[in-house]
Amino acid sequence: MSATLFLDTSGWFAALSPPEHGHAVARERYADAVRRGLLLVTTALVAAEMHTLILRWRGAGAGILFLETVFETGVHVVASVDDDVIAAALSRWLRRFNDRPISLTDAVSFEIMRRERIRQVLTFDRHFAVAGYEALSKPR
């Protein structure tokens, strides 16, 4: 299996948006992953969150360009989210961490990472560390 990096909304958006907290770190980690040829994996749920943020930040044209880049260029792999993944996210992650405000998007991300054996994630969301994954967005 080639080296893989999961893209979460918090780290990915910070990499693209200079005003975001942690932009320089996230941008460096994202650019390094691209340079090294890592497989960049995300879900349609994360892409939808990203699209919403980009719409608000840069407008409709930028939102469409983002979606075209994610879904049509082959640079990113968008993992399938079906009923089985949702059910596993609910049972394995949301119920397990029911004392924490983990979103369905994050729980689905955890499940995809588990299934694909992805250990590293571009994120600032501390819930990924709680779930046992290595966040690359934190300062070294």
Image: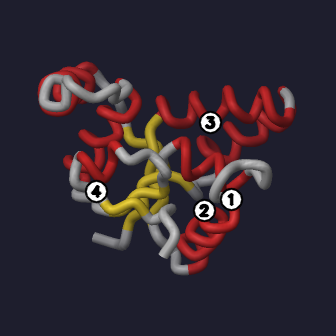
Name the kind of residue labelled 1 in the image: His
Measured in 3D between alpha carbons, the distance from the residue under mark 2 to the one under mark 4, in whole angstroms, is 16 Å
88 relative to 62 in the view: left or right: left
Measured in 3D between alpha carbons, the distance from the residue under mark 3 to the one under mark 4, in whole angstroms, is 21 Å
Give me the residue at 33% from left, 43% from top. Answer: 127
132 relative to 120 in the view: left or right: left
Asked if the residues shown at circle 3 and circle 4 are in contact, with their CB atoms under 8 angstroms apart, the answer is no
Measured in 3D between alpha carbons, the distance from the residue under mark 2 to the one under mark 1, in whole angstroms, is 5 Å
Can you identify the residue that label 4 sits on?
133
Mark 4 is surrounded, within 10 Å at the Cα level, by few (under 14), some (14 to 19) or many (20 or more) other residues, namely some
The mark closer to the camera, 3 or 2, is 2
Name the kind of residue labelled 4 in the image: Tyr
Colour convention of the picture: secondary structure
Quick one: SS at disc 2? Answer: helix
Can you identify the residue that label 3 sits on?
50
Asked if the residues shown at circle 2 and circle 1 are in contact, with their CB atoms under 8 angstroms apart, the answer is yes
Quick one: SS at disc 3? Answer: helix
The mark tally for this picture is 4
Q: Considering depth in this image, is 51 or 56 the residue closer to the camera?
A: 56
Q: Considering depth in this image, is 53 or 84 the residue closer to the camera?
A: 53
Quick one: SS at disc 4? Answer: loop
Residue 75: percent from left, percent from top: 58, 58
Q: Considering depth in this image, is 20 or 116 the residue closer to the camera?
A: 20
Name the kind of residue labelled 3 in the image: Met
The quadrant where residue 30 appears: bottom right
Measured in 3D between alpha carbons, the distance from the residue under mark 4 to the one under mark 1, in whole angstroms, is 21 Å
- Numbered label attached to residue 26: 2
- Numbered label attached to residue 23: 1
